Image (cartoon, helix red, strand yellow):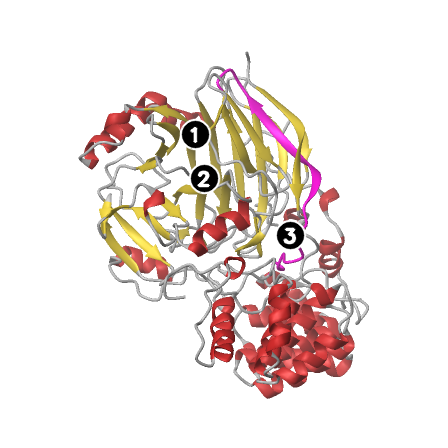
Amino acid sequence: MTSTLHLRTLSLPTAPIGPPNPLPPIFAPSDTHQVAAPGDADAEMLNGIRYGRVRSVLPYLLQDGYDRSLTETEHEVAVLENEVLKATFLLGAGGRLVSLVHRPSNRELLFRNPAFQPANLALRNAWVSGGVEWNIGTIGHSPLTCEPLHAVRARHADGSPVLRMYEYERLRGVVFQIDAWLPEGSPVLLVHVRIVNPSDATVPIYWWSNIAVPLTPDVRVVAPADAAWQFGYDATLRRVQMPVTGGIDRTYPTRSTEAADYFFDIPATERGWIAALDAEGTGLAQVSTRRLRGRKLFLWGQSDGGRHWQEWLNGPGHDYLEIQAGLARTQLEHLPLPPRAEWSWVEAYGMVRCPPDHVHGSPWSLARDAAARGVEELVTETALERALTEAKTWVDDEPLEVLSVGSGWGALERTARARSGDDSLRMPATPFSDSTIGPAQQVWLDLLDGGDSLPGDPCEPPLSYEVDDRWVRLLGRATGWRAALHRGVAQAADGDFDAAETEWAASAHEQPNAWAVRNLGALARFRGELGLAVANYRAAHRLRPDLLALTLELLEVLLEADEPAAALAVVADTAEPQRAHGRLRFAEARAALATGDLSRVSAIIESGLEIADIREGETSLTVFWDAYQDALSAGLDRQPMPRALDFRMKASD
């Protein structure tokens, strides 16, 4: 058969992402990839670790409006198919490759999540497991991982249909383009990725393709390396020998107790590939051209917390591991993309078959060499380099058909640049149509068109924020309380907190509004001025007592300020259904514990305390349980943490 591309719908039990949190994330959330001890990192790696860190995910807003209730929902997908493979892409969730089926054997090569259940693992909170995720921006799961991408039909030079997905990434101000195709008879899905820096400044860049595959006791992960950089939840980077370190063969993920990353230290002379192979020596391999240098194994581990995370993300009986590929050697680094430059590479995904006695034999070199031969038989390095070279003849072609629409931010940015004579975002291959501009962008377009204020009801939060210098300059000429609010957010994003404080105070003085006052509270909390933080949060909450996000932040500040009785009063004043929110009930439990009301704590736990957006690496539940046991014990035996509350990522949590 010839290669085909068509749209379909995929029905999945789904917990909707929900609306974005309207409160700007002024300060970065906890970062599980923050390096506390660089340990064995060399000079090049240290530079990458220190370079390009962001203060927050602004201008993006957080996506924390989901819960754990699943409803059967139709999702739009694009399907590429030839005689050998069938690839399914979830267009509304970052273009994720959710399924890759080897048709002759009817084998699913990826871990296919049976549901769409967000959890708090990404830069903006919401993330779903499974398939292949395309990560760009900064360290962590992409800000676009739960957003729709622009998707169009294009054509390869050989006539094969191409699925092109693209978007303007606001954190770095770059355009990324993913072109996926299946040549007739090809045993591999080919993916050409291009990142374009349209600016006159060097930009820190991050890219990792995260590939989830089924986890079974016999699966072994193989890559062309004899050592790896190990990074665990103790935030220490160590260079270790592979496959055996600490007396355990880490290439068998089910043999490790704790969650960890292993970044394979692949020699520069070696081709970059990674494979996950079962007892028969068969499984998925990912290989690329040389630009994509890094390869990684991620495992959740077999601790109670690690197994609970698997069930939390995927449901009972559905476990996965991840093999990954990235631009840098580790996921802790950024690389500098020069001004007006672009980087591109080709990735290939397919099924390899290797002799099982070699894959699972000893020494390690036997498995490594067998997998290398399997990858070379699947697709040669020459073939991939040829695909990369040939891509230059068609990746700039205009799309043939629009399949799905992403955000309007690219169109807004193209318009803003064009006003100053800069056509760098007028790219035929990745058009950003004016028709994509919606309410979140319109306020900025009006400002660009000469508006001298940002109108809006003080009772309603802004729909969006901008922190780029171009928009800061335009905000500088604007008047009114809302302009001052936005200037403060932009200044905070730039690290100028004193200037931000001045703007927010001016905004609140001109027009009392919960948004500026809340930001003043968040800043005071950041500075450790808890009394001032409480006062500001109380004032903000009086202006919008119905806003759950604001209520939750107020409760956290009250607990930090050791005002548990006041926190319980806020809980009592909160109406249903907000009263049932997991974060609110957790705040109630901690406040009750602090006031000595152990029966109330017990009732909350026994009724089922469930925090839908518990953060990866968050230790608050462990701290709470230990304090609860201290209060209960009085010489009695301490009870182990219930599995439903156990999200511990390391033994010391």
What crowding class fits label 1: few (fewer than 14 Cα within 10 Å), some (14-19), or many (20 or more)? Answer: many
Dot 3: element: loop
Q: Are marks 2 and 1 in contact (CB under 8 Å)?
A: yes
> Which of marks 3 and 2 precedes in the sequence?
3
**Residue 277 visible, this orientation:** yes
Kind of residue at disc 3: Arg
Query: Is 180 situated left or right of 265 in this image?
Result: right
What crowding class fits label 3: few (fewer than 14 Cα within 10 Å), some (14-19), or many (20 or more)? Answer: some
What crowding class fits label 2: few (fewer than 14 Cα within 10 Å), some (14-19), or many (20 or more)? Answer: many
Q: Which of 257/504 is in front? A: 257
Q: Which one is in front in this view, the residue at disc 2 or the one at disc 3?
A: 3
* Residue of label 3: 68
Which percent across, then down, holds residue 427? 59, 39
Query: Residue at horizontal 30%, vertical 58%?
Result: 237
Query: Is 224 situated left or right of 31 in this image?
Result: left
Which quarter of the image is occupied by the N terminus? top right
Disc on res. 211: 2
Disc on res. 349: 1
